[in-house]
Structure formats: structure tokens, C-alpha cells
Image (cartoon, rainbow, N blue to C red):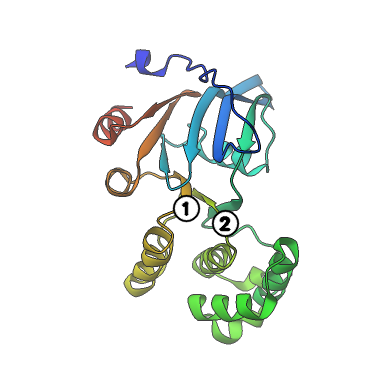
């Protein structure tokens, strides 16, 4: 099985960076300093995702999925390698939400709309309707449950016109009715958007993704046969 995860060099294709409408990782390496020395979490990861393509990032806990998502978003810098961001990318959608706890939900809306140049009134109306937070939209985010934070993060990311969504370990939250709404908004109404999703669900990957990056011990390989990708992932 180790042979599947030999180092994959990026294709040497000449592209115009202005016209290259892809999110592309080129030989990405990430190392951390630990008390036991340098630890390489990602080792030569290369792939490309274009408009309307959905890539599942599969790997066991500690395989580097969240680290890769953070690098793609620009939250972390790669130790070596390069990320090309030819699409307008979302922040990483994760269960915690990642927002400043002292701010209210409304303050967060105002901050995000200022940052991305979106209209405040329409954004707040969308977020209020989507999250169903009611008066809690004016409560500090630190008092939100994980589910409430995830609702706020989902709603704000959908309110901004992103071309590529980064999703870290969470696809659907809340009760079944809200889950269906998340599904419809993200996977149906935005089927033309690119997505990179660090997930554990093999069924989800098979049904909704066009490719999968399987990570093991820092190495990764892209598969376009989702059944094969999930079979390899299940055997890790």
C-alpha cells in the first residue's frame, strides 16, 4: 500500500497565472518544531482543483488534513512549496467557527462585510434567516454552542460570493431540517463552486466529490476513482 503514496511531483504545465482559474498546491511541505525535533506533517503534496470540482481530503486523525486546509486558506505558511489561489476562496469552515468570542454575531457580520466589501443589510438579513439565531445574533459569540458557531460560519460564507469553499471536518450541522438546508444551499445551489473538503465520510465523498486526495504519513495521492480512493482510505 505504501507504493500508492510515493512522492507526486506537480505537472510541469506552463500557465498564465492571471488566467489560471484553479486552486493548486505544488510540492507543499509543512514542518513543525516539537520537543522531539522537527516533524514533517505534509511531505510534497501536489494537486489542482478547478471551477466546479469537489475534492475530498481523506486521512486518519493526524494525517495533516486540517493543516493542509489552513495552508490553502493562507492561515499557515508552507515550509516549502507553493499554493496558487486562482479562485476567490472562503475561510476554512470548521465546527468551531473560528470567530472572535467578544464580538456578537451581528458584529461579526459587520466585520466580514467590511472585509469583503459586501452589503451589510442584505448580509445580516441572510444570516438571520439562515441561522435562525433570533435575538442571539446580538449575543457575544463566546456564549454560542459549537453548533451555533458553525451555523454562523456557514451562513456568512454563503452570504459572500466565494468561488471555492474550504471545509474542515464539518458538512452538515443541527437538526435534520437544518442539515437539509445546508445541503441545498452548499451542494445544490452552489454546484458550480469549487470545494476542498477534509472529511471522514466515504459515502459523502463517493456521492458528491469528483476526486479525492488520500493522505498517509505526510504523503498524498489524488484519485479520480472514488471507490478506489475510499477503499485505500479504509485500509489505512
Decide which of 70, 122 is in the foreground and name it: 122
Residue appearing at x 60%, y 39% in the figure: 72
Picture coordinates of residue 39, whole percent (x, y) = 61, 22
Badge 2 is on which residue?
162
On screen, 142 above or below 81?
below
Nearer to us in this view, 164 or 138: 164
**Displayed quadrant of residue 159:** bottom right
Kindly identify which residue carries mark 1: 193
Q: Earlier in the sequence, mark 2 or mark 1?
A: 2
Q: Which quadrant is home to the C terminus? A: top left
Residue 174 - label: none
Q: Position of residue 60 (x, y in %)?
A: 41, 35
Residue 194 makes an appearance in the image:
yes
Q: Is residue 19 left or right of residue 49?
A: right
Q: Quadrant of residue 135?
A: bottom right
Could you classify mark 2 by the number of other residues whose Cα lies within 10 Å: few (under 14), some (14-19), or many (20 or more)? Answer: some
Query: Foreground: 176 or 225?
Result: 225
Identify which residue is drawn at 49% across, 29% down.
47
| Disc 2 element | loop
Instruction: Place residue 108 in its image quadrant.
Output: bottom right
* Label pair 2/1, CB-CB below 8 angstroms: yes
User: From the image, which quarter does the N terminus lie in?
Assistant: top left
In the image, farthest residue toward the bottom: 135
**Helix, strand or loop at mark 1:** loop
Q: Residue at x 35, y 41 (%)?
A: 210
Across the whole image, how many numbered discs are drawn on residues? Answer: 2
Disc 2 from disc 1: Cα separation: 8 Å
Residue 222: give x, y in percent of width and height.
40, 28
Amino acid at each position: 500500500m505504501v507504493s500508492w503514496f510515493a512522492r507526486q511531483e506537480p505537472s510541469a504545465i506552463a500557465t498564465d497565472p492571471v488566467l489560471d482559474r484553479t486552486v493548486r498546491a505544488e510540492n507543499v511541505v509543512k514542518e513543525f518544531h516539537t520537543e522531539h525535533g522537527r516533524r514533517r506533517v505534509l511531505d510534497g503534496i501536489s494537486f489542482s482543483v478547478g471551477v466546479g470540482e469537489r475534492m475530498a481530503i481523506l486521512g486518519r486523525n493526524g494525517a495533516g488534513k486540517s493543516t493542509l486546509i489552513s495552508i490553502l486558506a493562507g492561515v499557515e505558511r508552507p515550509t516549502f512549496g507553493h499554493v496558487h489561489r486562482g479562485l476567490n476562496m472562503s475561510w476554512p469552515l470548521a465546527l468551531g467557527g473560528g470567530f472572535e468570542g467578544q464580538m456578537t454575531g451581528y458584529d461579526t457580520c459587520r466585520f466580514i462585510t467590511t472585509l469583503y466589501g459586501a452589503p451589510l443589510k442584505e448580509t445580516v438579513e441572510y444570516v438571520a434567516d439562515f441561522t435562525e439565531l433570533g435575538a442571539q445574533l446580538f449575543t457575544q459569540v463566546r456564549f454560542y454552542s459549537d453548533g451555533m458557531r458553525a451555523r454562523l460560519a456557514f451562513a456568512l460564507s454563503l452570504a459572500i460570493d466565494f468561488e471555492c469553499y474550504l471545509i474542515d471536518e464539518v458538512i452538515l450541522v443541527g437538526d435534520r431540517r437544518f442539515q437539509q438546508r445546508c445541503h441545498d444551499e452548499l451542494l445544490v445551489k452552489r454546484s458550480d463552486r469549487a470545494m476542498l473538503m477534509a472529511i471522514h465520510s466515504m459515502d459523502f465523498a463517493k456521492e458528491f466529490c469528483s476526486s479525492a486526495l488520500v493522505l498517509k504519513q505526510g504523503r498524498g495521492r489524488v484519485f479520480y476513482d472514488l471507490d478506489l480512493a475510499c477503499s485505500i482510505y479504509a485500509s489505512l
